[in-house]
Amino acid sequence: MQKGNVMNGSDCESIFAALSNYLDGELPEADCNQLERHIQDCAPCVEFVNSLRKSVRLGKQYRPHEPAPALSPGVKRSLEAAYKAMLARQQEPPPEKP
Ligand SMILES: [Zn+2]
């Protein structure tokens, strides 16, 4: 994985790619910081990450003696679909007001 330059500006798709590693605990701390920095400036990402964290925390509560479980592929897929739908919505022009 590239280091340092993974996330540039406000590329939500890069953020999502990094989030997978983030959730797996494989993201270097520097990249975590970049990710969190982007998220601070990106309201849709905030919501998305909050829901991700909730799932991760639920997993931790379920098995407190084990490290955070990896999300199942099915969960990841549905999160990815939700995220892409969110991005598509974000890219649509705002509804015109008469
Ligand atoms: Zn974003």
Image (spheres, rainbow, N blue to C red):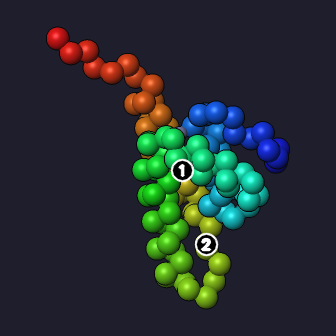
Q: Where is residue 23 in the image (x, y as percent from the top left)?
A: 62, 61
Q: Nearer the viewer, residue 13 or 33?
A: 33
Residue 83 in view in this figure: no
Q: Is residue 32 above or below residue 69?
A: above
In the image, taking residue 15 as reference, residue 4 lies left or right, namely right
In the image, taking residue 37 as reference, residue 51 lies left or right, namely left
In the picture as drawn, the residue positioned furthest to the right comes out as 2
In the picture as drawn, the residue positioned furthest to the left comes out as 98
For label 1, the residue is 77
Q: Residue at x 69, y 34 (%)?
A: 8
Classify mark 1: residues with Cα within 10 Å, few (<14), some (14-19) or many (20+): few
The dot on residue 66 is: none
Q: Could you say whether the residue bearing mark 1 is in a helix, strand or loop?
A: helix
Residue 28 in view in this figure: yes
In the picture as drawn, the residue positioned furthest to the bottom comes out as 65
Q: Residue at x 54, y 46 (%)?
A: 39
Circle 2: residue type: Pro
Which of the two labelled residues, at mark 2 and mark 1, occupies the earlier sequence position? 2
In the image, taking residue 22 as reference, residue 28 lies left or right, namely right
Q: Where is residue 72 in the image (x, y as percent from the top left)?
A: 57, 63
Mark 2 or 1: the one toward you: 2
Q: Label 2 CB, ligand 1: below 8 Å?
A: no
Q: Which residue is drawn at 64% across and 33% down?
A: 9
Q: Where is residue 83 in the image (x, y as percent from the top left)?
A: 48, 43
Q: In this view, does 59 lie above or below 41?
A: below
Locate residue 90: give its quadrant.
Answer: top left
Q: Do the residues labelled 2 and 1 touch (CB within 8 Å)?
A: no
Q: Position of residue 51 (x, y in %)?
A: 44, 58
Classify mark 2: residues with Cα within 10 Å, few (<14), some (14-19) or many (20+): some
For label 2, the residue is 69
Q: Nearer the viewer, residue 32 or 59?
A: 32
